[in-house]
Image: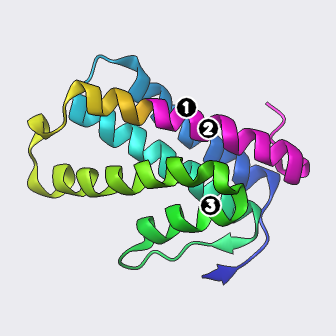
Amino acid sequence: MKFKSTSRDEIAKKILAAQTFGNSAREGNNPPSVQFTLAYDAARIWCEIVLRAEGIIPKTSRGHHEKTISATVRYLGTEAEPIANRLQQARKTRNDVMYSGELGYVSGSSAENLIETLNKLEKLVLEWLREKHPDLLPMF
């Protein structure tokens, strides 16, 4: 991983992206596989926010989603372990959906479960930012 400081603007853009994906996942008018994929992408962006707040630029090579999710626990603490474990499972499912093209692959309950995990992660990251990096919180 590379290191480079971040800015309030960069974090604000990432938060907006994560919230946009998350809100789209929560709407419920998409098929479960689309909701699942949107929730996964939102969660991944929340993990990237943690790393960027710490000055880390996640690599974009093969396996970067897995590494980004795992690294997040180091900063958020043990409270994030069950969330990270669920996201690692979701990562595998998301890959199956994305690369097989089978939109019926994900059940409604799987999408709902991931959205619940996303909600927990979003809350945890925002609390962590308030405590550890209040200077990076956006002003919106």
Q: Which mark is residue 119?
A: 1
Q: Amino acid at mark 3?
A: Val
What crowding class fits label 1: few (fewer than 14 Cα within 10 Å), some (14-19), or many (20 or more)? some
Asked if the magenta segment contains residue 74, the reply would be no
Q: Position of residue 127 (x, y in %)?
A: 77, 39
Name which residue lies at 29% across and 16% down.
Answer: 29
What crowding class fits label 2: few (fewer than 14 Cα within 10 Å), some (14-19), or many (20 or more)? many
**Residue designated by label 3:** 73
Asked whether the residues under the numbered discs 2 and 1 touch, taking CB atoms below 8 Å apart as contact, a structural biologist would say yes
Distance from label 2 to label 1 (Cα)? 5 Å
- State the residue lying farthest toward the right: 135
Distance from label 3 to label 2 (Cα)? 14 Å
Asked if the magenta segment contains residue 122, the reply would be yes
Q: Secondary structure at mark 3?
A: helix
What crowding class fits label 3: few (fewer than 14 Cα within 10 Å), some (14-19), or many (20 or more)? some
Q: Amino acid at mark 2?
A: Glu
Region of the chain picked out in magenta, as a range: 116-140
Quadrant (top left/top right/bottom left/bottom right) for the N terminus:
bottom right
In the image, taking residue 5 as reference, residue 95 lies left or right, namely: left
